[in-house]
Image (spheres, rainbow, N blue to C red):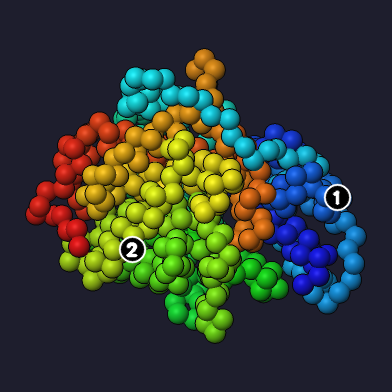
């Protein structure tokens, strides 16, 4: 592919992901609520956006949900080649489609580095994390009305984090915020045509399990897509589903690890809600298929994406060593969550436990001294990233609470808890989660260049998931996880425990 072709493909890659999160400082976004967009031209990964300089939203129009959407985009000029023209068309298609995400660009992006605070010597880590969970949640809710949040993956992760925080704290303000979010989308109607639009179904089914049955249709709509969406040759759910034209889908990998978190936890809970095992069976099947394909046998880490037969190729290739922290976090968090809901006798349970232990052990060995994880796990010079760190720490904490992981993992959580505390910027009652990388596509040269910003929806959600679960483990609090009642200290009663 020509250089111009690569540039235009990156432009499309940047635009394609639009739909969840918060805009960073230095990027001008064309919508009323900043919570409806995550990936913009900043995802080009070029610092000052030296490629296409003219990429910008020109006009805006109201969306049905009250936000503003770009309706025209100007691309800078590109040299012509067959591949260049093809990828330009795909990139332009992605940009135009992402107009529904409502964004336009300026030429500035933010830096990738995150300044860290220092946890006070001898401080009460559990107490500090509990206070921070409440402060982070309320800071978000004050700034971003629930009714203005998009129905997309970033907001789905955020909502799940708020739900878990509600379950831990009992704070009714969190529950009411989630109800307002779901009611707004029940009234508008939602369309689920690919993985990124299925994620909010998770909080809908969580609310159903807590008695809010009015949200069952939202959960059912997500599940209908998950169960019937297009599959790869071996049966893996295609990430882009049928939301984009064939030309656009052709330039992206078929299967993305992100899809696991977007669909499997919802299936597990929907199976409990309906008492139909077929949903959890499909969730377990997707986990097994994805991780068999995506796991590098040499490093033990998980690739971001995969093209199924006949190519059978991980993207980026295993030999590149470009293993993305958030992608591995998606995998670990989904594994441990699923194992909380799968019954002890399930046919896939033993293999999933082994996958969990191998991945967790490898990730724990890569934890930085700060307690966080670098965005490229095997490159210590790459920046520490919040969402990936949060997902990994959530996975380790819940794995420990389910007795899937050894007690030595507790030291990882203690370091991780201090790391989580350090990336929250506090000012009075405000608590801002910093250091989340913007939406990221599976392109080897892109990961280390993606900028970070504050108050990105999925970064806040991952932070809440991790901080809440770490508090549960470090405090030895009693809680239920799916099918298994967990005793104080993280012990699972022998009658329900199965550890392989």
**Vertical side of 412 occupied by 323: above or below:** below
Q: Position of residue 59 (x, y in %)?
A: 83, 46
Quarter of the rendering containing residue 470: top left
> On the picture, is 307 further left or further right than 357?
right
Q: Position of residue 313 (x, y in %)?
A: 55, 75
* Quadrant into which the C terminus falls: bottom left
Q: Give the residue at x 88% y 63%.
A: 78
> On the picture, is 23 further left or further right than 308?
right
Which of label 2 and label 1 is nearer to you? 2
Q: CA distance from mark 2 to mark 1?
A: 44 Å
Disc number for residue 478:
none
> On the picture, is 377 further left or further right than 14?
left
Q: Which of 51/135 is in front?
A: 51
Q: Give the residue at x 53% y 68%.
A: 318
Badge 2 density bin: few <14, some 14–19, many ≥20, Cα 10 Å: many
Instruction: Classify mark 2: helix, strand or loop.
Output: helix
Q: Give the residue at x 38% y 35%.
A: 415
Residue 314 shows in the view: yes
Badge 1 density bin: few <14, some 14–19, many ≥20, Cα 10 Å: some
Q: Position of residue 1 (x, y in %)?
A: 77, 72
Q: Which of the two discs, 2 and 1, labels the residue nearer the N terminus? A: 1
Judging by the rendered image, the residue that carries numbered circle 1 is 53
Instruction: Classify mark 1: helix, strand or loop.
Output: loop
Q: Which of 159/316 is in front?
A: 316
Q: Position of residue 171 (x, y in %)?
A: 35, 28
Disc number for residue 355:
2
Q: Give the residue at x 22% y 39%.
A: 479
**Vertical side of 289 occupied by 194: above or below:** above
Do the residues bearing badges 2 and 1 touch, measured as CB atoms within 8 Å?
no
**Vertical side of 347 occupied by 155: above or below:** above
Residue 183 shows in the view: no
Residue extending furthest toward the top: 428
């Amino acid at each position: 592919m020509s250089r111009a072709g690569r540039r235009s493909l990156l432009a499309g890659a940047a635009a394609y992901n639009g739909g969840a999160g918060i805009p960073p400082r230095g990027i001008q976004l064309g919508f009323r609520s900043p919570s409806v967009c995550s990936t913009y031209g900043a995802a080009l990964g070029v610092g000052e956006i030296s490629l296409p300089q003219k990429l910008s939203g020109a006009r805006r129009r109201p969306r049905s949900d009250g936000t503003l959407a770009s309706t025209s985009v100007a691309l800078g000029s590109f040299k012509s080649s067959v591949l260049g023209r093809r990828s330009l068309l795909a990139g332009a298609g992605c940009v135009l489609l992402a107009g529904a995400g409502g964004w336009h660009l300026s030429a500035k992006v933010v830096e990738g580095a995150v300044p860290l605070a220092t946890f006070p010597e001898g401080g009460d880590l559990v107490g500090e994390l509990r206070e921070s969970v409440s402060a982070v949640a309320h800071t978000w809710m004050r700034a971003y009305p629930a009714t203005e949040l998009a129905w997309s993956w970033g907001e789905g992760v955020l909502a799940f984090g708020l739900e878990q925080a509600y379950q831990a704290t009992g704070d009714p303000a969190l529950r009411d915020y989630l109800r307002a979010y779901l009611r707004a989308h029940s009234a508008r109607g939602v369309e689920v045509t690919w993985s990124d639009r299925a994620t909010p179904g998770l909080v809908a089914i969580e609310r159903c399990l807590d008695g809010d049955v009015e949200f069952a249709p939202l959960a059912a709509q997500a599940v209908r897509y998950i169960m019937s969406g297009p599959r790869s040759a071996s049966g893996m759910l295609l990430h882009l589903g049928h939301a984009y034209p064939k030309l656009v889908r052709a330039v992206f990998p078929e299967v993305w690890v992100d899809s696991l978190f977007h669909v499997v936890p919802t299936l597990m809970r929907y199976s409990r809600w309906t008492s139909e095992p077929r949903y959890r069976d499909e969730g377990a099947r997707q986990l097994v298929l994805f991780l068999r394909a995506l796991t590098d046998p040499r490093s033990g880490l998980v690739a971001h994406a995969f093209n199924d037969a006949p190519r059978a190729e991980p993207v980026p290739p295993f030999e590149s060593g470009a293993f993305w922290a958030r992608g591995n976090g998606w995998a670990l968090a989904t594994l441990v969550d699923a194992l909380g809901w799968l019954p002890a006798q399930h046919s896939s349970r033993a293999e999933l436990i082994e996958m969990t232990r191998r991945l967790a052990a490898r990730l724990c060995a890569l934890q930085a001294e700060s307690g966080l994880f670098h965005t490229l796990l095997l490159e210590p010079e790459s920046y520490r990233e919040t969402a990936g760190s949060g997902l990994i720490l959530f996975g380790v904490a819940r794995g420990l609470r389910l007795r899937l992981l050894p007690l030595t993992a507790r030291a990882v959580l203690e370091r991780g808890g201090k790391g989580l505390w350090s990336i929250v910027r506090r000012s009075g009652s405000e608590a801002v989660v910093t250091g989340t990388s913007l939406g990221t596509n599976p392109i080897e040269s892109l990961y280390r260049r993606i900028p970070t910003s504050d108050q990105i929806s999925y970064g806040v959600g991952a932070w809440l998931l991790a901080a809440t679960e770490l508090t549960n483990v470090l405090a030895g609090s009693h809680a239920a996880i799916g099918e298994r009642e967990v005793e104080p200290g993280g012990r699972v009663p022998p009658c329900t425990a199965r550890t392989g």
